[in-house]
Amino acid sequence: MKQPPTGWVAVARALDDRLRELGWRQWELAQRSQVSQAVIRELQYHTVERSRGSRTLEALSTALGWHQDHLHAVLHGIEPRLPDAPADGGDPVATRLDVIERRMAAMSATLNELRVDLTTLLQRTRER
């Protein structure tokens, strides 16, 4: 029986699968996560193996609609948490802060989408 990938190969596969599932391109994930497209490309295609900061993996996980620790868990071969799972075993304050952080990330992604839409609209209006 074939073993599932581990380490950065598993992260690459998770990113690839999720982007395909959502129908997103790298540039969309870059805008939503505020992680450079070059870093996303390196991770998705596993072209450069280097340590990444936890904030990079958290930003990507959150932008993809996963728990903030999802890609970190994938990297270390741990079962990822569900998006609404508490970060540290049930501390209600930490849980609430996680929810607020995810909501803020979602709002940030929505604002970025609006910015892109407005920029496109302005460009089209100026072309007329």
Image (spheres, rainbow, N blue to C red):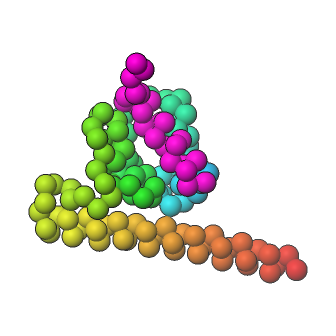
**What is the total number of numbered labels drawn onto the structure image?**
0
Q: Position of residue 40 (x, y in %)?
A: 52, 44
Q: Is residue 124 above or below residue 58?
A: below
State the residue in front, 11 or 18: 18
Q: Position of residue 27 (x, y in %)?
A: 60, 53
Q: Residue at x 54, y 60 (%)?
A: 31
Residue at the top extreme, as displayed: 1
Q: Position of residue 2 (x, y in %)?
A: 42, 20
Residue at the front extreme, as displayed: 1
Is 22 left, or right, of 82 in this rendering? right
State the residue in front, 106 or 18: 18
Residue 21 falls inside the magenta stretch: yes
Q: Which residues are magenta?
A: 1-23
Res 89 → quadrant: bottom left
State the residue in front, 65 or 40: 65
User: Where does the N terminus fall, quadrant-wise?
Assistant: top left
User: Is residue 85 visible from the viewing direction of this image?
Assistant: yes
Is 6 left, or right, of 38 in this rendering? left
Q: Position of residue 84 (x, y in %)?
A: 29, 62
Residue 7 falls inside the magenta stretch: yes
User: Is residue 27 visible from the viewing direction of this image?
Assistant: no
Is 34 left, or right, of 91 in this rendering? right
Q: Residue at x 17, y 64 (%)?
A: 94
User: Where does the C terminus fall, quadrant-wise?
Assistant: bottom right
Principal secondary structure, stretch drawn in magenta: helix
Q: Is residue 43 above or below residue 32?
A: above
Is 56 left, or right, of 73 in this rendering? right
Q: Is residue 109 above or below residue 38?
A: below
Q: Is residue 55 above or below residue 72?
A: below
Res 126 → quadrant: bottom right
Q: Residue at x 29, y 34 (%)?
A: 76
